Image (cartoon, rainbow, N blue to C red):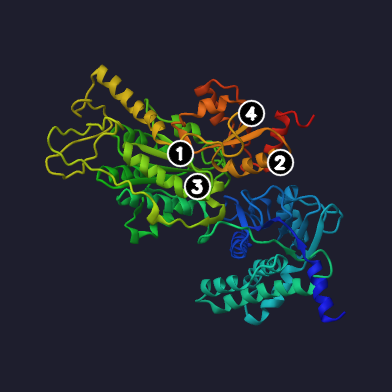
């Protein structure tokens, strides 16, 4: 075969695909999160749309080789719109038997398994609970299997750098990454640049990892005509023009909150105590001191939120971040912020289960806690972010509402949004409309509970302002004086005012729109938070099949949009899809007396598109 015909044959051997789902899985010490992140970077640079899902254990170091210690990273990328990390992987990289056992059930029938056969020894097979080796006993017959001696080939690739066996084997994730880069036509240079920067002080480690990366790539080049290893082409996704980067939810939320504080012309002060999956917000904002951000890690959650409230009292924007168990500990102090009517932004990155639950798994089970979880009649604003891009906008909106209405605002995100990455068009912040905070300075007639007649927000007076000495606190205050009051009618009035102030915000938020479909019809699927991508794709497929179904996704959880009730009543049936046992469903039924249907999932894993599509088809009788 001459050179020209060889090239033609090679092009024919490349399979064109609209989208692909790849899942990297291994022991938590195998570097699967790092491998997945770097593959995502290389994929984003090639112009694919993408969504990722890091899925890792809570244990800092579970026993090596056990199913408890399996860490996985899934990426869905394509030349078409991608809004979820994908249902069933097309490719599963299994670095040991435990990784295969944990992830095999989710693999597409006919999908490709790339396994490090060296790791499938008797010891690891026992740890994973296998009675026989799945790579040789025929149990994987319905899949494509490429059992490669990855460990051995990695050791061979890095032997000239003099690393010990343990350090040398740590490079096998780069060998695997090199192979996947070749399979999907991604460039190695961005990864090489990153390795050289990361290990600048340890050049031998950098060289060894680069050698492993190149070796994996070279293996693909030389082995392409045999076995199941072959190349695929996934084209570019045509995004609107602009400057893009990949971003996860916690990053976008931190930047949104910072942007909001600058639009309000306020110093941002974060009081926080570490907890998964909210800790990265503290890490990110701690690195933004050049923008005037002040952060402190308190001794516990109560100190953290009280410090943030103190910052707001002093004229800054108080921010506190946590997850469900931490928010529970902050509850009394949040009530104090409601009673004192100070702006405060509270971020709840939800995780699965009550108490400490499943710290690294996702869920949406803090809605009741956010809306109603306080003593006394204590209303506040609750917003829900639905993806990384939305996090930036929700962060700004939370600051706007908190400062305009002098109220705490809770932002609900979750573990999936926090860790998942997607392309993000970097906004031009100079085009955003400022909403500078107003501080009271007029001495005549001042008391701390004077109110704006339209917003019902009380005045915000900085301590130390001449002639505006005042006190606020958790005890009830007189409506006409701001002094402590036990008068029954005053308490009734103050309770009514605090409730009315929050309800009035419904007139200052957008009316609810139909995300896909139209107002009125046979069926609507209602969601909130990170279910957006799965619902969007399921409704799109169902509409493509001719089914009358629409999609409504809520950002404003409390108060609800003023047109929502009439909008939901325009459909014959309403499905509420959420990752809890029915919290939004209960809220909507209580507010609108609607006979909604619940689609619930509480496995710690996000919805699959197919699960929602099946519910749509069943509800509409399309399966009959």
Q: Disc 4 versus disc 3: distance between alpha carbons?
A: 27 Å
**Residue pointed to by mark 2:** 544
- Circle 4 packing at 10 Å, graded few (<14), some (14-19), many (20+), is some
* Disc 2 secondary structure class: helix
* The label number, if any, that marks residue 588 in the structure image: none
Per the image, label 1 sits on a secondary structure element best described as strand
Say whether disc 2 or disc 4 marks the residue closer to the N-terminus.
4
- How crowded is the residue under tag 3: few (<14 C-alpha within 10 Å), some, or many (20+)? some
Which label sits in the foreground, 2 or 1? 2
- Give how far apart the Cα atoms at labels 1 and 3 are: 11 Å
Drawn side of residue 110 relative to residue 29, left or right:
right
Q: Earlier in the sequence, mark 1 or mark 3?
A: 1
Q: Residue at x 24, y 27 (%)?
A: 477
Residue assigned mark 1: 383
> Disc number at residue 390?
3
Cα–Cα span, label 2 and label 3: 26 Å
- Quadrant in the picture for residue 480: top left
Q: Is residue 340 visible?
A: yes
Quarter occupied by the C terminus: top right
Which residue is more in the foreground, 600 or 283?
600
Mark 2 crowd level (few <14, some 14–19, many ≥20, 10 Å Cα): few
């Amino acid at each position: 075969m001459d050179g020209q015909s060889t090239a033609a044959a090679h092009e024919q051997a490349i399979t064109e695909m609209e989208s692909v789902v790849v899942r990297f899985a291994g022991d938590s010490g195998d570097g699967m999160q790092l491998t997945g992140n770097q593959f995502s970077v290389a994929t984003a640079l090639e112009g694919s749309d993408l969504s990722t899902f890091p899925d890792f254990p809570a244990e800092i170091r579970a026993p090596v080789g056990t199913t408890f210690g399996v860490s996985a990273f899934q990426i869905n990328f394509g030349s078409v719109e991608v809004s979820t990390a994908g249902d069933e992987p097309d490719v599963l990289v299994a670095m040991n038997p435990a990784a295969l056992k944990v992830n095999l059930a989710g693999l597409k029938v006919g999908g490709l398994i790339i396994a490090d056969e060296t790791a499938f020894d008797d010891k690891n097979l026992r740890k994973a609970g296998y009675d026989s080796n799945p790579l040789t006993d025929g149990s994987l017959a319905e899949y494509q299997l490429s059992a490669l001696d990855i460990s051995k080939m990695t050791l061979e690739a890095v032997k000239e750098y003099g690393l010990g066996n343990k350090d040398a084997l740590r490079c096998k994730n780069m060998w695997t990454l090199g192979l996947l880069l070749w399979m999907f036509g991604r460039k190695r240079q961005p990864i090489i640049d990153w390795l050289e920067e990361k290990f600048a002080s340890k050049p031998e480690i950098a060289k060894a990892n680069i050698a492993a990366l190149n070796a994996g790539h070279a293996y693909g080049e030389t082995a392409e005509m045999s076995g199941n290893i072959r190349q695929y082409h996934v084209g570019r996704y045509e995004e609107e023009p602009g400057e893009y980067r990949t971003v996860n939810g916690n990053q976008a939320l931190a930047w949104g909150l910072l942007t909001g504080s600058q639009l309000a012309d306020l110093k941002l002060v974060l009081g926080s105590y570490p907890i998964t999956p909210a800790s990265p917000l503290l890490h990110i904002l701690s690195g933004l001191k050049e923008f005037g951000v002040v952060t402190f890690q308190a001794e516990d959650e109560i100190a953290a939120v009280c410090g943030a409230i103190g910052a707001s009292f002093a004229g800054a924007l108080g921010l506190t971040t946590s997850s469900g168990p931490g928010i529970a500990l902050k509850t009394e102090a949040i009530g104090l912020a409601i009673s004192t009517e100070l702006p405060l932004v509270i971020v709840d990155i939800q995780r699965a289960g009550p108490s400490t639950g499943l710290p690294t798994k996702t869920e949406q089970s803090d809605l009741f806690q956010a809306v109603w979880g306080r003593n006394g009649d204590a209303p506040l604003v609750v917003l829900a972010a639905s993806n990384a891009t939305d996090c930036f906008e929700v962060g700004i909106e939370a600051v706007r509402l908190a400062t305009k209405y002098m109220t705490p605002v809770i932002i609900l995100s979750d573990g999936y949004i926090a860790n998942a990455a997607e392309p993000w068009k970097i906004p031009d912040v100079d085009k955003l409309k400022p909403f500078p905070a107003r501080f009271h300075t007029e001495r005549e007639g001042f008391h701390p509970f004077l109110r704006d007649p339209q917003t019902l927000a009380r005045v915000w007076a900085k301590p130390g302002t001449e002639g505006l000495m005042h006190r606020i606190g958790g005890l009830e205050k007189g409506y006409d004086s701001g002094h402590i009051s036990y008068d029954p009618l005053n308490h009734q009035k103050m309770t009514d005012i605090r409730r009315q102030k929050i309800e009035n915000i419904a007139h200052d938020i957008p009316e609810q729109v139909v995300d896909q479909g139209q107002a009125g019809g046979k069926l609507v699927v209602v969601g909130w938070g990170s279910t957006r991508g799965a619902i969007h794709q399921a409704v799109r497929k169902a509409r493509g099949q001719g089914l009358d179904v629409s999609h409504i996704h809520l950002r404003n959880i409390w108060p609800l949009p003023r047109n929502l009730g009439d909008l939901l009543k325009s459909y014959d049936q309403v499905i509420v899809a959420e990752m809890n046992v029915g919290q939004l469903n209960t809220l909507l039924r209580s507010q609108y007396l609607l006979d909604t249907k619940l689609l619930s999932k509480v496995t710690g894993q996000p919805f699959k598109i197919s699960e929602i599509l099946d519910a749509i088809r069943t509800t509409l009788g399309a399966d009959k």
